[in-house]
Amino acid sequence: MDKRGETVVWFNEVRKQDIPSVGGKGANLGEMVNAQIPVPSGFIVTAHAYFSFLEKTKLKEEIQWLLESLEPDDIRKLQEIAALVKDRILKAPMPQKIADEIKGAYRQLGEGLVAVRSSATAEDLPEASFAGQQRTFLNVQGEEEVVAAVQGCWASLFEPRAIFYRHQHGFDHFKVGIAVPVQKMVQSEASGVMFTVEPLTGDNTRIAIEAVFGLGEAVVSGEVTPDLYILDKETLRILNRRIGRQEWQVMKNPKLGEGEANLRIVLPLADQMEQKIGDDEIIALAELGKRIENLYQFPQDIEWAIENNRIFVLQTRPVTTLKTTKVQALPEIKAKPILAGVAASPGIAVGTVRLVPEPSQIDKVAKGDILAAEMTTPDFVPAMKRAAAIVTDKGGRTAHAAIVSRELGIPCVVGTEVATKILKDGLEITVDGSRGLVYQGKVIEEGVVLPRVLPRRRLKTQTRVYVNLAEPEMAEVVAARDVDGVGLLRAEFMIAQIGEHPRFMLAERRGEKFVDRLADGIAIFTRAFHPRPVVYRTTDFKTNEYRNLQGGEKYEEFEENPMLGYRGCSRYTKERDVFQLEIDAIKKVRESYSNLWVMIPFVRFPDEMAEVKKVLESEGLYQTADFKLWMMVEVPSNVFLIDKFVETGIDGVSIGSNDLTQLILGIDRDSPKLADQFDERNEAVLLAMEKVIRTCCSRGVTSSICGQAPSVYPELTEKLVEWGITSVSVSPDMIDETRQIIAVAEAKLAVTR
């Protein structure tokens, strides 16, 4: 059923293919209802309704204007702009047709108390995750109140944390929509979160359940330290339990309309250390968790509630921090800890304490500081990215602080109860996230000890990992690996297999055969990697290499130094008829596979690049979402004039570190006498690469590297990630190691930021 034009749909009408209309949360609710999982009934106000609201109220242009001058790293400005945008959305009149449909669905649901939740989605950004960024309204009652809560969810799409996230990931604010599930409210006696994998270690043989008295708002937010129960997934035997002290619980306000919808009710002292749910309920929850994991075939993060002895599942989502982690040679610490809590994210860090009592003060946290707070919320994320470690009074291993710390790869200790009382601003401390301990002063010499992230399943990194390929028979094998595409497809090997000089074949009126054979070779790669991009570097044969092809001696002059001779882009501007053969092959492949991109090698001058771009456009090869034009950076002029090359309109660059190094250092890379001095890690080469990457980053242009340097010197990859490179392309044998290096480098970068 197509949901794109509807304002309201019911849970049982929705399946996972409806994510663009109902968001991940909404789609999951539909999947569970259809799988007979006990889910409170409800409906979803679709993303179409949100976009229709923006259109009918003409808010889009005004919001765009407000966001235009925003620098998200300016925290105070971010908060001011976010408040203005939310105010505009909340004060705009709800279109009558949308309001009537929401009210009608609420009446059909039976009215009464409902939960109104946010489910952000992006139709053409399937990998995006917006969990925890938007509002939830509990215990909402009344038609007008439900409509107002829906509008509140829409406004929360512009919370500071949500704007910051989209900016960090380069997402268009108006390509991200929001659906709103409206669900019968469960008045839970106990509630919590269940992971069908142990969240700290990634142990897939365990189930972790956290529980609190009352509504689950307290455990999800981290305001209360919950009970923790660890079970064996196979036998459902309870292996370990840790009872958390709970001083209060969240319950609905019995006097609706008077004050807050939910109240904090103080628990009797005798109940504060009670186990929150019985062993039979723990086991029943685990059984349900296994069913849900089996439904999705992936470990799940599940919110649950118990009302009148009935278990309900409120929502589920895939575990996004699935890692097996082990700390590399954690040093023995003999000092006495000043704080103890829950080990929430492994590793050890030393830094200066910054107490942050509320999100408005997150700008206190500088790079390398230790963020200490009662708890964290999504509004703390910009500061968490700068922190070396995090310590909180409250929360368990599924609290916000714990999950975000694991994603960032920084140490975290939660549930200390008294961190904000014991710690003082400016105090130097050591945080041991692996053991859940905090020490005064610097008690280790090594500084930050990060966890080594080992892939249980395929690692996801923000920096893409591409592969350098030339041999067609390797395509299928390498495409099955954990690689994001081909960052360098060399034409030379395929042309060598053709065996004849292209001008020789033109002279014999066999140009079409050249086109067909080259297209067939390229198509092997595009087919194997589809829909992942294949960046095809147009021919970069030197004159001596072209002379070796059949008929080549007639067309190639002898050159003393072919490396600096007639090659690359210069050929395309001077020999349009030969370049046309390559263009025809590219066009032929793209008729079947839209994932073929083009990269121009050895470009000496900006006007050369501009001329080639015009030629491609004259042949119908315009740059689009699925056709990108890159340029190799391998000549020093590319570095000095990088802004001018970018201004020609290219989509990206890829650093050819082999040629760039030899031309910067003046060393023939093939000279055995100078081989020990040919090193891409030379300061001059590093400065050149840094300039190119940082410039491209600031200009919104993709940057990559496809020379041998990252394959030979893994430590260089860390620097590339630090500078902001978009992708790294390596030889097939280095794919997994490079992904690993990037994952750790991104974690280190998160720590230092």
Image (cartoon, helix red, strand yellow):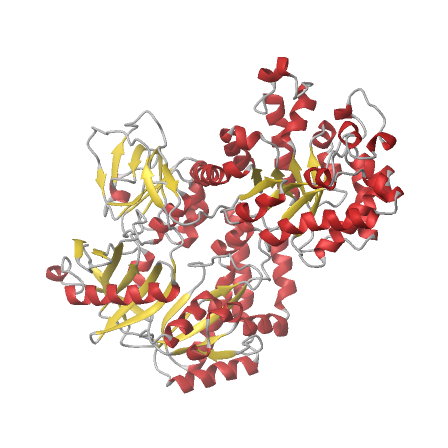
Q: Where is residue 11 in the image (x, y as percent from the top left)?
A: 42, 77
Does residue 273 lie above or below 424 as drawn?
A: below
Q: Is residue 228 visible?
A: no
Q: Position of residue 613 (x, y in %)?
A: 79, 46
Does residue 337 lie above or below 158 as drawn?
A: above
Q: Which of 661 and 722 is in front in this view?
A: 661
Left or right: 271 in relation to 518: left
Q: Where is residue 373 in the image (x, y as percent from the top left)?
A: 33, 46
- Can you name the residue that lies furthest to the left here? 270
Residue at image position (65%, 17%) is 671
Does residue 693 lie above or below 285 as drawn?
A: above
Left or right: 33 in relation to 648: left
Residue at image position (45%, 70%) is 27
| Residue 624, image quadrant | bottom right
Left or right: 609 in relation to 446: right
Q: How many marks?
A: 0
| Residue 470, image quadrant | top right
Left or right: 5 in relation to 336: right
Q: Position of residue 350 (x, y in %)?
A: 34, 32
Q: Is residue 410 visible?
A: yes
Q: Which of 352 and 708 is in front in this view?
A: 708
Residue at image position (44%, 70%) is 26
